[in-house]
């Protein structure tokens, strides 16, 4: 096993010397990771234009995050990971988003896969991490694959979109329905496929989150053995094969509750960045047409205050919910369906609230805000892009919550 990332090393002297990670407790490790993320923000901000132009993360950014250990936060210790808590990971993601939301988005989505791989049969974990525990996985969970049941596994074909960070990864998770057999219902699974068995279509040409490299994935009649699949039902019941070997309560949190935070939480950090820029610019800015200070405009004041509220509220609810989840997992208890529906709605609320808040900050930046080089412009584009992810469809999830409160059946399968 390669334990390269078991030491947090980097040229910056704010990170830990090689080998010291083994001597740290979780609290000190968390503090060090947060400090490394904070110190990386200015560098990410400097690289933001390059990141957007490349349509993926610069290699310098990717390797800096690997060296800092960010991808290891939720990875099992037995494969070189840190096994910290979910909120520890999202603290790092949110902080990085203050420098570049595309970078934070890729970290969120890709590192969450290290958590999901811990739920797989150990044979799959060994295949991915056995020789190099820095190996990364991208994904597209759309249930669009065509599956044929064969001896020992499945034949898989399909085309999946929006695989963030795909050019940086050596494996991919793709979603598909296993057709019903022997009287059983159709079964949604995540299929783990190695790089040599899929192609990447580089078609990421977008206005926001430009640096995420969320390209298409094509799989053409590839064999996937049984052990490289993960049943959604097992994830729901917290009874996946990997739970037998990765026994930390961390891995008994429902996958549907942790993945959705990976595509909503970076908006919080990007909104913080936009708020910081708005305050700095508007403190002394005077309108060219009316010669009045923007800081005295009541609507501008309210926009800043409301953005701060959204940031604080979003973090507070996320921390509370993860505390509830961890407490249940520590006692080997499953969350109720009612709790899961409410928590999914809580997660979906983050992106639209951040989008509404950044839109108001954008309006109060004046006409200068429409220029690409304006500090708020990229955050405005990125947050609104992230808002479109299906997991952030607050209307659908809100209707499901309201309907369930009034006795209607649950319609969400990703809980």
Image (cartoon, rainbow, N blue to C red):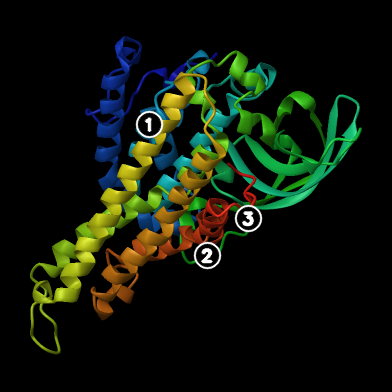
- SS at mark 1 in the image: helix
Q: Is residue 15 above or below residue 219?
A: above
2 and 3 marks in contact (CB < 8 Å): no
Residue at point 49% right, 35% down?
111
Of the pair 174 and 196, the residue shown nearer to us: 174
Q: Residue furthest top?
A: 23
Label number found at residue 42: none
Quadrant occupied by the N terminus = top right
Residue sitting at x 47%, y 57%: 386
Residue 336 vs residue 27: left or right? right
Whether label 2 touches label 1, CB < 8 Å: no
Q: Is residue 258 visible?
A: yes
Point out the frontmost of discs 2 and 3.
Answer: 2
Q: Is residue 145 above or below residue 83?
A: below
- At x 28% / y 21%, what residue is drawn? 27
CA gap, disc 2 and disc 1: 36 Å
Looking at the image, tell me whether mark 2 or mark 1 is earlier in sequence order.
Answer: 2
- Name the residue that disc number 1 marks: 323
- Image coordinates of residue 168 in percent, x first then y, are 55, 40
Which mark is on residue 206? Answer: 2
Residue 377 percent coordinates (x, y): 33, 67
Q: Position of residue 120 (x, y in %)?
A: 65, 24
Task: Look at discs 2 and 1 and give the one toward the viewer.
Answer: 1
Mark 2 Cα within 10 Å, few/some/many (few <14, many 20+)?
some
Residue nearer the viewer, 276 or 205: 276
Left or right placement of residue 129 versus residue 329 in this view: right
Instruction: Find the distance from the CA under tag 2 to the CA under tag 3.
Output: 12 Å
Using the numbered discs, state the Cα–Cα distance from disc 1 to disc 3 in whole angstroms: 39 Å
- The local secondary structure at tag 3 comes to loop
Residue of label 3 = 202
Depth check: give the residue in front, 373 or 128: 128
Counting from the top left corner in percent of width and height, residue 15 is at 27, 26
């Amino acid at each position: 096993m390669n334990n390269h990332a078991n030491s947090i090393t980097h040229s910056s002297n704010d990170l830990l010397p090689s080998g010291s990670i083994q001597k740290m407790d979780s609290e000190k490790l968390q503090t060090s990771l947060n400090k490394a993320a904070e110190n990386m923000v200015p560098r990410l901000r400097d690289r933001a234009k390059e990141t957007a132009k490349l349509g993926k993360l610069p290699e310098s950014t990717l390797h800096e995050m690997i060296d800092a250990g960010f991808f290891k936060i939720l990875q099992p210790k037995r494969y070189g990971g840190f096994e910290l808590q979910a909120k520890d990971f999202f603290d790092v993601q949110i902080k990085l988003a203050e420098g570049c939301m595309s970078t934070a988005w890729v970290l969120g989505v890709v590192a969450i896969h290290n958590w999901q791989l811990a739920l797989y049969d150990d044979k799959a974990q060994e295949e991915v991490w056995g020789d190099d525990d820095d190996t990364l996985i991208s994904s597209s969970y759309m249930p669009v694959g065509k599956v044929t049941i064969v001896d020992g596994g499945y034949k898989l074909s399909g085309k999946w979109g929006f695989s963030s960070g795909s050019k940086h990864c050596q494996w991919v998770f793709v979603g598909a329905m296993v057709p019903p057999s022997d009287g059983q219902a159709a079964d949604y699974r995540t299929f783990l496929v190695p790089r040599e068995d899929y192609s990447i279509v580089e078609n990421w040409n977008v206005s926001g989150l430009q640096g995420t490299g969320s390209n298409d994935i094509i799989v053409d009649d590839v064999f996937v053995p049984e052990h490289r699949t993960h049943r959604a039902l097992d994830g729901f019941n917290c009874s996946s094969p990997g739970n037998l070997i990765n026994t930390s309560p961390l891995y008994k949190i429902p996958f549907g509750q942790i993945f959705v935070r990976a595509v909503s939480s970076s908006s919080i950090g990007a909104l913080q960045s936009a708020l910081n820029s708005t305050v700095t610019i508007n403190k002394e800015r005077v309108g060219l047409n009316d010669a009045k200070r923007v800081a005295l405009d009541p609507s501008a004041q309210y926009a800043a205050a409301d953005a701060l509220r959204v940031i604080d509220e979003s973090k507070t609810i996320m921390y509370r919910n993860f505390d509830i989840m961890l407490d249940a997992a520590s006692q080997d208890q499953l969350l109720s369906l009612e709790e899961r529906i409410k928590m999914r709605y809580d997660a979906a609320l983050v992106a639209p609230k951040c989008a509404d808040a950044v839109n108001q900050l954008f309006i109060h930046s004046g006409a200068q805000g429409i220029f690409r080089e304006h500090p708020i412009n990229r955050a405005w584009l990125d947050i609104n892009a992230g808002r479109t992810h299906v997991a952030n469809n607050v209307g659908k999830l809100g209707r499901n919550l309201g309907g369930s409160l009034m006795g209607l059946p649950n319609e969400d399968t990703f809980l």
